Amino acid sequence: MSNQPAARLRHARPARRAALAALVLVFLAFLAIATTSRAGDAPLRGVIPLASADGACNWLLTNAEPWRQSISLIDYSPVIGKVLQVTATPTVFQYSELRPNKPVLIANNAAEFNGVLQLDIFSDPADAMLAVCVRIQDRTGEFFQYHQPETTRLRTGQWSTVAVPVGTPYKHRSNWGGNKDGVIDYPVSFYAVTIDYTRGFIGQTRMLFDLFTWTPAADAATVTPPTPAQ
């Protein structure tokens, strides 16, 4: 594996990080009050924290042990702070499901369900990652999966911003579970991000994640443009 990517320090976005840090504090206060999502709760606008209020990792990997994957919260740099690190062997299992400890409410109705799930990602090596998908869970437990635009690609040796449009204006690629009717029952929550690995990739991959952010369409002007294809 390569050393810590210095490119992130050169291209860090301090103003964005400061604004998002304030949103993190607000969201942590919300989590301290509510432990379950209920109709009438205020949907998230902003960052989904990497760590809980006590500093513990706020994210899980599904089936980490049988799929020979691992997740940890690591100190990246004094400027950036902590990031999530995921390791995987794609020949053992072809994707990773990375999710917060509990689903995060993002919309109480169809009008609110329109936005972008964005994250910063560094894949070592870059060609190990094929695609990012977002999984949404509705009131009945049914899952709906949305895919990143095909024009989005990671930059070799650099952090990249990936944005996945999610909501009523966009067609989900698949659905399963819950009442299995293919109809979204509100409220809905962000459940997980999945990382699909490149078929045929041999070896272990290390991926770093930061700034998981839900931005409603009404706040679209604040979205950082995704990294363009090379």
Image (spheres, rainbow, N blue to C red):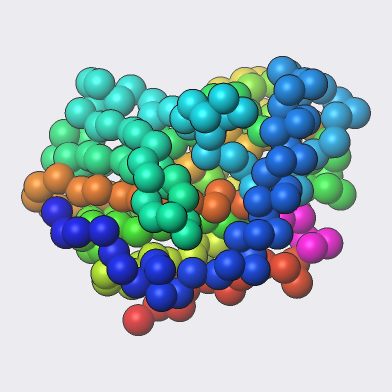
Task: Examine the rendering and report whether any part of residue 164 can be seen.
Answer: no
Image quadrant in which you'd find residue 181: top right
Seen from this angle, which residue lies furthest left? 202
Q: Is residue 36 above or below residue 67?
A: above
Image quadrant in which you'd find residue 160: bottom left
Q: Name the side, left or right, on which 59 lies relative to 218.
A: left
Expressed as whole percent of the image width and height from the top left, the position of residue 20 reads 67, 55
Q: Name the side, left or right, on which 100 lies relative to 27.
A: left
Q: Is residue 221 above or below residue 1?
A: below
Q: Name the side, left or right, on which 4 lies relative to 219.
A: left
In magenta, the rendered stretch is 214-219
In percent of the image, x 24 and y 48: which residue is there? 206
Expressed as whole percent of the image width and height from the top left, the position of residue 183 reads 71, 35
Expressed as whole percent of the image width and height from the top left, the position of residue 89 reads 17, 40
Expressed as whole percent of the image width and height from the top left, the position of residue 212 reads 56, 49
Task: Examine the rendering and report whether any part of residue 43 can be seen.
Answer: yes
Position of the N terminus by quadrant = bottom left
Image quadrant in which you'd find residue 110: top right
Seen from this angle, which residue lies furthest right? 40
In percent of the image, x 47 and y 30: which residue is there? 57
Does the stretch in magenta take in 216? yes
